[in-house]
């Protein structure tokens, strides 16, 4: 597949970016700046500009030590921060519900979402949809902007809302916009985008990473679901499901769902791309986010020598973050799920030792074993540091070159969202059909078609917990279901405080339209 080296486009489009909700950019006039009145003019320039939005998503979800992907996982009961208690305190604090407004990770991902939105605003404002090529580009920008605003609303609640980039200092100072107002605009944008986007099958192999009609429909369905607009949610999600077999489907081999073999495949609806083709070593790796490999895979790989002889299971040692909890192991056991899905997700200590591995505990000064921080008896296999997923060429550092893509939306999630929407719309007989597709792939018994709404609701909750483990879904599902306090209070969750991340303190200080009184409750 052709690789777009999108970082090479930075000199072109970064000059168009406006910092997130800040007027600091006005302090320096950038030398050699491209005129906003003339760029982008050509189709190629328009394409380069929308590629900038994909690039910024890659950066925001994979930025070293400031990953939106990992940050979204941390509050859930499937994931522990891992490593050591003193390693990367901002991540440790999110994991432990010590959420502070000056958390550097929270600040960084807020910035990342807004930079992506600003790039999309540039496309929407300046690319005239004078032909089908340009119509598609504008539609992509609307869908990407909608996704990034959805992420902001889920994580932070009401946020400043820009559909046009500010052109003066005063325009940067915006109050928090009610999320209902934001959602209404996102719905409009996505409906417009859906009309102009191609089917996934119409995208050539080198363009499969781009937003398709099914991507925009799935984002819209998710937005409806989070607003409890059940009928609208299953109506649009059923359109995606109606393309099963021609556009989407469930990956037959569970082991490939999150691996390179399944990248941009039948189950992929929306995916953030990374590559191993740069062949980084310790001297040329772009620390600070200027890289195209997925460094967080290495960050979240099992640490040696605690996990010894990882080669026995085809894994390279990582830096020890993102350890599975006992809760997710127990959930698999309680469901009787010990087949392909389980094996592609986690491995117990006993299974690791049986496969040829060993656990070598640290010792204190007296030679007594010391419990490893956040270790609860399991090793994560999903998104792990598999040797086959990186570049092992001579002179290349494998740890710096993982090409594993984050799957933001999978077809399995579409099925589970539709199942939930049908069930909450008093149509459990339709919801169970979609749920059973996911259960069948996992090797579980099918649920009866005559299932009650209550029983199906509980089945969906359990199924999402297992199917979407370590995919930045669990905590936010618990919040929207009103179950976060019940499940997470023993881990430090406090109701009416931890449902949302705090608005970054930098935003409160720089935005004259937001004061400390506007902060999320409890922060």
Image (cartoon, rainbow, N blue to C red):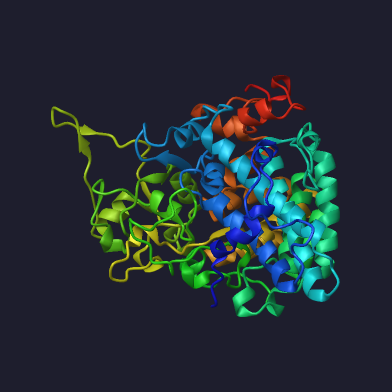
Q: Where residue 117 appears, x then y in whole percent? A: 71, 50
Percent coordinates x, y for residue 184 in the rendering: 85, 47
252 to 115, vertically: above or below: below
Outermost residue on the left side: it is 366
246, 296: nearer the viewer = 296
Residue pictured at 79% horizontal, 50% vertical: 224
Residue 90 at x, y = what percent?
48, 34
The quadrant in which the C terminus is found is top right
Q: Is residue 451 visible?
A: no
Q: Is residue 515 left or right of residue 106?
A: right
Q: Which residue lies furthest to the top in this view?
A: 517
Question: Residue at image x 42%, y 61%?
Answer: 402
Q: Which of the two residues, 280 or 171, is positioned nearer the viewer here?
A: 171
159 on left or right of 24: right
The one nearer the camera, 509 or 227, is: 509
Asked whether residue 475 is in view, the answer is yes
Position above or below: 237 against 303: below
Q: Which residue occupies the extreme front position in the image?
A: 31
Q: Where is residue 164 in the image (x, y as percent from the top left)?
A: 81, 48
Figure quadrant of residue 497: top right
């Amino acid at each position: 597949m052709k690789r777009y080296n999108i970082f090479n486009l930075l000199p072109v489009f970064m000059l168009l970016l406006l910092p997130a909700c800040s007027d600091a950019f006005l302090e320096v006039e950038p030398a050699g700046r491209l005129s906003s009145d003339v760029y982008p003019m050509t189709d190629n320039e328009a394409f380069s500009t929308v590629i900038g939005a994909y690039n910024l998503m890659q950066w925001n979800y994979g930025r070293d030590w400031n990953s939106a992907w990992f940050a979204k996982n941390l509050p859930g009961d499937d994931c522990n921060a891992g490593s050591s208690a003193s390693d990367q305190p901002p991540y440790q604090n999110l994991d432990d519900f010590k959420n502070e407004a000056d958390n550097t990770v929270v600040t960084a991902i807020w910035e990342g979402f807004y930079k992506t939105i600003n790039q999309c605003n540039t496309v929407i404002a300046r690319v005239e949809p004078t032909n089908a090529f340009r119509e598609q580009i504008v539609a992509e920008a609307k869908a990407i902007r909608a996704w990034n605003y959805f992420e902001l609303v889920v994580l932070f609640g009401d946020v400043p809302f820009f559909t046009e980039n500010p052109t003066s200092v005063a325009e940067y100072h915006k109050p928090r916009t009610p999320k209902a107002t934001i959602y209404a605009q996102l719905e409009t944008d996505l409906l417009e985008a859906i009309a102009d986007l191609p089917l996934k099958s119409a995208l050539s192999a080198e363009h499969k990473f781009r937003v398709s009609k099914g991507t925009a429909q799935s984002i819209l369905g998710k937005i409806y679901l989070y607003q409890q607009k059940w009928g609208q949610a299953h109506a649009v999600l059923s359109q995606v499901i109606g393309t099963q077999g021609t556009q989407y489907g469930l990956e037959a081999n569970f082991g490939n769902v999150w691996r390179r073999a399944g990248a941009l495949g039948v189950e992929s609806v929306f995916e953030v791309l990374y590559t191993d083709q740069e062949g980084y070593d310790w001297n040329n790796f772009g620390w600070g986010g200027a890289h195209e490999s997925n460094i967080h895979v290495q960050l979240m790989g099992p640490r040696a020598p605690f996990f010894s002889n990882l080669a026995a299971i085809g894994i390279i040692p990582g830096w020890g973050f993102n350890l599975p909890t006992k809760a997710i192991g127990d959930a698999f056991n309680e469901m009787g799920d010990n087949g392909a899905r389980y094996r592609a997700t986690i491995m117990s200590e006993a299974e690791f030792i049986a496969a040829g591995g060993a656990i070598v505990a640290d010792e204190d000064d007296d030679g007594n074993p010391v419990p490893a921080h956040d270790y609860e008896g399991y090793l994560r296999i999903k998104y792990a540091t598999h040797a086959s997923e990186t570049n092992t060429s001579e002179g290349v550092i494998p740890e710096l070159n993982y090409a594993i893509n984050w799957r933001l939306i999978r077809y399995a999630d579409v099925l589970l969202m539709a199942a939930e929407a049908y069930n909450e719309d008093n149509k459990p007989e339709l919801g169970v059909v979609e749920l059973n597709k996911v259960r069948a792939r996992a090797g579980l018994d099918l649920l009866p078609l005559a299932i009650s709404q209550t029983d199906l609701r509980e089945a969906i909750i359990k199924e999402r917990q297992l199917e979407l483990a370590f995919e930045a879904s669990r905590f936010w599902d618990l919040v929207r279901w009103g179950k976060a306090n019940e499940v997470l209070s023993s881990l430090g969750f406090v109701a009416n405080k931890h449902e949302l991340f705090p608005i970054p303190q930098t935003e409160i200080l720089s935005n004259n339209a937001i004061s400390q009184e506007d902060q999320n409750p409890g922060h």
